[in-house]
Amino acid sequence: MVLPDKTLAVGDSAADIKAAQAAQCWSCYATWGLSHEDKLREIQADIVVDSPEKLCRIVLQRYNG
C-alpha cells in the first residue's frame, strides 16, 4: 500500500487534478502537448510541469534527495 502523501498523480485535465486532490495525493498538472495556459488559474495543482523531463527531475529530486 502506498500512502497518499507519498503519491504523485499526474494528469492533463482539471478532472485528473481534482481526482488527485480527492485522494489526498500530490497533484501534478502536465501541460506538454496542448496549450493549457487558460486553465492554470482554475486548476490548483501542487506542481505544474511542461515536459516529461522536468517531471522526471522533480520525481528524482523528491525521492533521491
Image (cartoon, grey):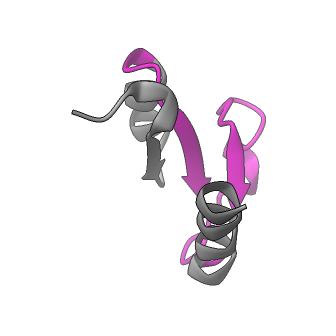
Residue 30, above or below 24? below
Q: Is residue 34 toward the left or the right of residue 42 in the image?
A: left
Q: Which quadrant of the rendered structure holds the C terminus? A: bottom right
- Residue 18, given in percent of the width and then of the height, sits at 46, 26
Quarter of the rendering occupied by the N terminus: top left
Q: Does the magenta portion include 25?
A: yes
Q: Is residue 10 left or right of residue 30?
A: left
- At 44% from the left and 40% from the top, the residue drawn is 7
Q: Residue at x 71, y 64 (%)?
A: 61
Examine the image and state in which quarter residue 33 appears: bottom right
Q: What stretch of residues is rendered in magenta?
A: 22-51
The relative height of residue 3 versus residue 51 in the rendered view (above or below) is above
61 relative position to 4: left or right: right
Against 43, residue 52 (above or below) is below
Residue 29 locus on image (x, y percent): 59, 50
Q: Give the camera-side residue of 46 and 43.
A: 46
Q: Residue furthest front?
A: 65
Q: Main secondary structure of the magenta part?
A: loop
Residue, x 59% and y 74% (percent of image)? 56
Residue 51 falls left or right of residue 27? right
- Foreground residue among 45 and 54: 54
- 63 is higher (above) or lower (below) than 9: below
Q: How many marks?
A: 0
Q: Position of residue 39 (x, y in %)?
A: 67, 43
**Residue 64, picture quadrant:** bottom right
Q: Quadrant of residue 4?
A: top left
Where does residue 16 sit, x and y in percent of width and height?
A: 40, 39
